Image (cartoon, rainbow, N blue to C red):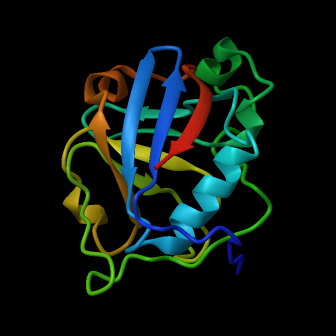
Amino acid sequence: MYIPSYKPHGREKAVFNTDKGTIVVELFGNEAPLHVGNFVELAQKGFYNGTKIHRYEPGFVAQGGDPLTKDASPADVISGKGPFGTGGPGHSIQGEFDPEKNPHVHQKGALGMARSMDPNSAGSQFYFTLEPAHFLDGNYTVFGQILEGLNVADDLRVGDTITSIEITD
């Protein structure tokens, strides 16, 4: 399991610059320090720059963060040409979804970390919930909440680009 060297102070925000507009997210560094630390490190390295949204489920989620989409054209991602949804940073972090330690739930605008069947397999792929998705609570880590730009998240579709993610306090 990867342990990020970045230690959150609990005031971080992530500014997602997309080709649809800007989304500002409060990060929950006190409740999900491994996820926030990992996300901040990846964002600061430019890992997410140029990645595409590779999954959109109406009324559920818009998902991105797969590095395999970075060099793909939006048309290729839309058509599904490639193993999109399977890429990551080369490491995994431990799940942080115990409600006693992380009380945040999948309300509309939550930022969560995708994973495989293994509860400790999150790496880089994230999702925005487009409506409440409480059936995910206790199984997937919520590590942020949209403060501004919920309409932008609602407009994200497969093939849309994350141009950059900036971390601010």
Left or right relative to 108: residue 116: right
**Which one is in front, 19 or 166?**
166
Name the residue: 54% across, 19% down. 160
Q: Is residue 22 above or below residue 27?
A: above
Question: How many numbered discs sit on the rendered protein?
Answer: 0
- Is residue 66 positioned above or below 35 on the image? above
| Viewer-nearest residue: 105 or 63 | 105
Residue at left 59%, top 65%? Answer: 37
- Residue 156, compared with residue 25, is above or below; it is above
Relative side of 8 to 134, left or right: right
**Residue 106 percent coordinates (x, y):** 26, 57
Residue nearest the observer in this picture, 137 or 43 = 43
Q: Is residue 9 above or below residue 60?
A: below
The answer to whether residue 116 of the structure is visible from this angle is no
Question: Looking at the image, which residue is at 43% across and 23% down?
Answer: 22
Q: Residue drawn at (62%, 30%), measured in percent from left and top?
A: 164
